[in-house]
Image (cartoon, rainbow, N blue to C red):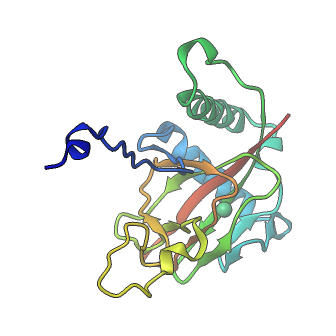
Amino acid sequence: MSASATTAPPIKVGVKPLFSTWIYLCENGPIHLNDRLEELAHRLMQDDRNATRRTNAGGWHYAFDLFKLDEPLVAEFRNQMEQHVRAFLNHFRPPERKKQDSFKLEGWINVNRAGHSNVLHCHPGCFLSATYYVKVPANMKGGEIVFRDPRGPAVAMYETPGIELPWVGNGTGLPFNPATGHLILFPSWLEHRVERFEGEGERISIAFNATNP
Ligand SMILES: [Fe+2]
């Protein structure tokens, strides 16, 4: 062994992720409000003027801002959701920088039944978006929310036969199978879609955006 080989400094190498995408998952949101939220959805659905078409392929989509309804139930739900948004924002801060952020929520109700879905989209004009699942049938087939991998064509780089690349996925994104009471918060720029719903009953969710007040 040569003298230079024995005295060479160790090679320093680091492997670390860049540009991670953060999702907030809560499995037990305000389920004590679910029955009343479902009643509210059904009450609003009785008036055709309350329905609109946005990202929904079929299904019922509330046309207005849910949080503008002057009802104690809505206020209680908003309060719960604000606490989750604040928890998500504070998660990334050291103790001395945690605070109670001010923001505005805008929300709407989605009711999907068999055959319904939501096309790929993101939520411009806001910083965080969310979905709370008021009701998910236990035997639901499909109905997943699928987040598209934001790394563009990287996840479809199959042209490296024999070399496995850790960033190559299936190109279709990451599905989450929601259940009643689940809450998902995600950055508003993250594209997502909802898969076709098959099965009995209704899949009721409340989606909302957080914006500057
Ligand atoms: Fe959405």
On the rendered structure, is 5 left or right of 44? left
Q: Is residue 172 visible?
A: no
Q: Where is ligand 1, by quadrant?
A: bottom right
Question: Front-most of 84 and 187?
Answer: 187
Question: Front-most of 133 and 92?
Answer: 92
Residue at 41 percent of width and 56 percent of height: 179
Question: Front-most of 36 and 131?
Answer: 131
Residue placed furthest toward the left: 1
Residue 102 drawn at (x, y percent): 77, 27
- Residue 142 lies in quadrant: bottom left
Residue placed furthest toward the top: 96
Residue at 63 percent of width and 59 percent of height: 190
- Residue 174 lies in quadrant: bottom left
Residue placed furthest toward the front: 3
Q: Is residue 19 visible?
A: yes
Position above or below: 38 against 152? above
On the rendered structure, is 131 left or right of 140? right
Residue at 54 percent of width and 15 percent of height: 95
Q: Quadrant of the C terminus?
A: top right
Question: Front-most of 196 and 160?
Answer: 160
Residue 168 drawn at (x, y percent): 42, 73
Residue 52 drawn at (x, y percent): 80, 70
Q: How many marks?
A: 0
Position above or below: 49 against 109? below
On the rendered structure, is 1 left or right of 18? left
Position above or below: 143 against 182? below
Residue 68 drawn at (x, y percent): 83, 42
